[in-house]
Amino acid sequence: MQDLLYFSQQLINGLTIGSAYALIAIGYTMVYGIIGMINFAHGEIYMIGAYTALIAITGLATLGIAWLPVILIVALVCAMIVSSAMGWAVERVAYRPVRGRHRLIPLISAIGMSIFLQNYVHLAQGSRNIGFPALIDGGFQFGPEGAFEMSLSYMQITVFVTTLVCMAVLSLFISRSRTGRACRAVSQDLGMANLLGIDTNRIISATFVIGAALAAVAGLLLGMYYGSIDPLFGFIAGLKAFTAAVLGGIGSIPGAMLGGLILGVSESMTSGYLSGEYKDVVSFGLLILILLFKPTGLLGKPEVEKI
Amino acid sequence: MRTSAKKLVTAVSASIALTAAGHAAAEIQIGIAGPMTGPVAQYGDMQFSGARMAIEQINANGGVMGEELVAVEYDDVCDPKQAVSVANKLVNDGVRFVVGHLCSSSTQPASDIYEDEGILMVTPASTSPEITERGYELVFRTIGLDSMQGPVAGNYLASLNPKRVAIIHDKQQYGEGIATAVRDTLKDKGVEIAMFEGITAGSKDFSSLVTKLKQADVDYVYYGGYHPELGLILRQARQADLDTTFMGPEGVGNKGINTIAGEAAEGLLVTLPPAFDQKAANQELIQAFEAKGEDPSGPFVLTSYTAVQLLAKGIEKAESTDPFQVAEALRSGSFETPIGKVEYDKTGDMKSFEFVVYEWHSDGSKTPVN
């Protein structure tokens, strides 16, 4: 019983963190699916989302607004707007001018953008860890008194449910809406979509905006869940989310979700049963194994040579 | 006309060169190297404010041997790579005395360069024993060692008669070193170590670690490292209803932990150098800090102040600005300073330095235990 509770606790920890990885991973995978480049500045967009949310929360607090739903919604909306604008601007400034060149050029441009944004936040917000207020407190307890109790905090539930809702909305959007259909068309064949009258530039911008908005959601959620943010925390999260995207099959949206969850759970199980020191070893080892035996990732489709 | 213009130019440049040379002769550069930015910039603030104050006061009292001290400040971000480039820059700038660095992992690589280039270094904060173990001539500190701080923490924990203790560290030179010292002390006292594990500095998610601590059913958790990680561990532990008492070294004892952990920081045990700012003899100095609107209560403010003061006294005693002669003067002398009487042994460590156990509060204040 004790062992089962312990296992479930680690599973919950892993799923919470994994679902947030999945939200960030969507941004990597969608951009890759459409223009075949890796947007290394995406982790920074997530970090900026978290900072914007914190600024919004602090602003509301100084105005004396204390009703939780208002705070959360305003913070979320502000973060999504600022991050989306950033995502859009990054694409316009750093990627569109070099699109269609050798594939290394946008990659270097992306790394440059990432360094720029990181240092911009360093300068604008200072480089210290800033505490994020715990807005959602408390939770459920399971298990016997006096022994190991499993806890499921409201915050964990919030992270998980919000991710599920975002994923559901995104799936509907991609499969049903006009823009979603255009997205799929562009990812299948950019040139052909262009010939058929789809404004591909607009669709590519839309992809960046959607990815950035989801990253902003993750920024707010993880900021609250962890409890502090700093200008460098987008880098590590970005790396993890990128791993999740590759694990699930880069270019595939369900793949990003699956990859995120697998990565989160494998991390928490490793630190739970082995040691926290091996957390990253195991998750990146897993990545190497999957790439060796299934190079397209778990749900990725093998690339078909287009004639 | 042309020749006179040429003459004028020559005269002007000669006078510029002369003033530059005259300027250089009338001042002694003191490098201050530490983190102005980065995750532990709080500690850097303490270091810079202490050192600047000392330089200001020494200059107000006529300088050192009639020469003015000039602060030259460098930011190493507490990053070993950055520390090396800072050290090289310092060499190129012709600085011969350094107060710094702060983080042990920065001080160690930088001190290699200083020793090679004949620069005298006094670190006001690095507590790793290895720094002075290498037989360097020009390395000093105004702080104690992990090998002193670890046993203080270990003995205190052992005196509480715990059944099981968990020890966590951040795998860095400072954190792991001190955690190892605590573990060894506790083992000698027969306390069971339930776990000894590293975390990755800079990571944010400690939910698995907290779950593990909960499962391990320990009485105390010792953390070797800095406040950004411990703050998050404390906060995530409280959220998961783990109410074990945590203890940490002076790397966690600053107000930064309160902005991260909030209420969860209440009751944290910290080993710190004694509160020099409470000493009666230092009250005049403390008022000087307060008059400038600076907080003198941080653990490294007065150690940095002392580092500058010792350099000044060393130069005066040696009657020379040759770093080797100053080092010799420091080793042979005995100095009255705000952190007490300072005497050095051969390695560059102080002959005695005390650590005290404090209880930390959620408003950022601290009270000495026992």
Image (cartoon, coloured by chain):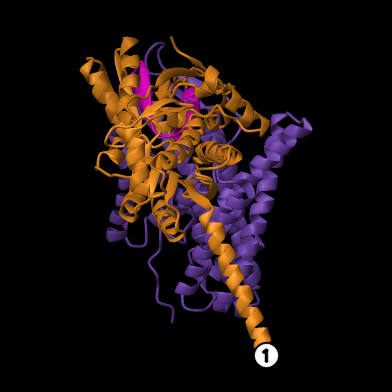
Chain colours: A purple, B orange
Please tell me whether residue B17 belongs to the stretch shown in magenta.
no
- Side of B50 where B351 appears, left or right: left
Amino acid type, callout 1 = Arg
Question: Chain for mark 1?
Answer: B
Residues drawn in magenta: B211-240
Residue B107 image position (x, y, % from top left): 37, 44
Determine the residue located farthest toward the bottom in the rendered image: B2
Residue at image x 67%, y 58%? A85
Residue at image x 30%, y 47%? A281
Q: How many marks?
A: 1
Secondary structure under the numbered disc 1 in the rendered image: helix
Front-lying residue, B23 or B258: B23
Residue B321 image position (x, y, % from top left): 42, 49
Q: Which residue is mark 1?
A: B2
Residue at image x 35%, y 51%? B114
When asked about the image quadrant of residue B348, the answer is top left
